[in-house]
Image (cartoon, grey):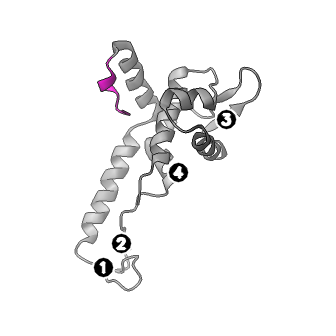
Amino acid sequence: MRLTKKSKYAARALVEIAVNGCDPIGVAEIARRQRIPERFLEQIFGDLRRAGILESRRGAHGGYCFAKPTDEVTLLDIIELLDGEIRPAKCSAGGVCYIDDAPLCSTSRVWDEARIALEGVFGRYTIADLAEIEREKLLSGNEAASILS
């Protein structure tokens, strides 16, 4: 398991779209505001669009907006879509680790507990939750309040 910049950038960009409301916003504008490489963000948005999380609109007032409600999209959904499942070293119930020749070991409980904890934290936050935190930060002018910083 590896959490990459791809997931972190996606979360920041999705919060930017959610804070923007119903008006589509372009990749260039999001990339500028969030200091994300534009070409990389375009690739991320392609993945999010294919997964049905975002939709794109063409034209002078085009850009990206959500294809589904932001309170139905968790950070876990984004991470697993872009970086794969959170599986530090999940052992199988059959008594054998995913490492081909290793028996189920005493540390398997630790890896499963770590996986469950990470899934719990990332699954607890929706894009709507993070957008609300961002809106509060913007209203208070307190940059330190941002969970995404």
- Which secondary structure is most common in the magenta stretch? loop
Mark 3 Cα shell of 10 Å, populated few (<14), some (14-19), many (≥20): some
**Residue wearing tag 1:** 104
Amino acid type, residue under disc 3 in the picture: Glu
**Residue wearing tag 2:** 91
Task: State which quadrant residue 31 falls in.
Answer: top right
Q: In percent of the image, x 38 and y 13: which residue is there?
A: 139
| Separation of residues labelled 3 and 2 (CA atoms) | 37 Å
Mark 1 Cα shell of 10 Å, populated few (<14), some (14-19), many (≥20): some
Q: Residue 36 at what x, y percent from top left?
A: 51, 36
Q: In percent of the image, x 62 and y 47: which residue is there?
A: 47
| Separation of residues labelled 1 and 4 (CA atoms) | 29 Å
Q: Residue 64 at what x, y percent from top left?
A: 64, 30
Pointers 1 and 2 in contact (CB under 8 A)?
A: yes
Which span is picked out in magenta?
142-149
Closer to us: mark 3 or mark 1?
3
**Residue wearing tag 4:** 82
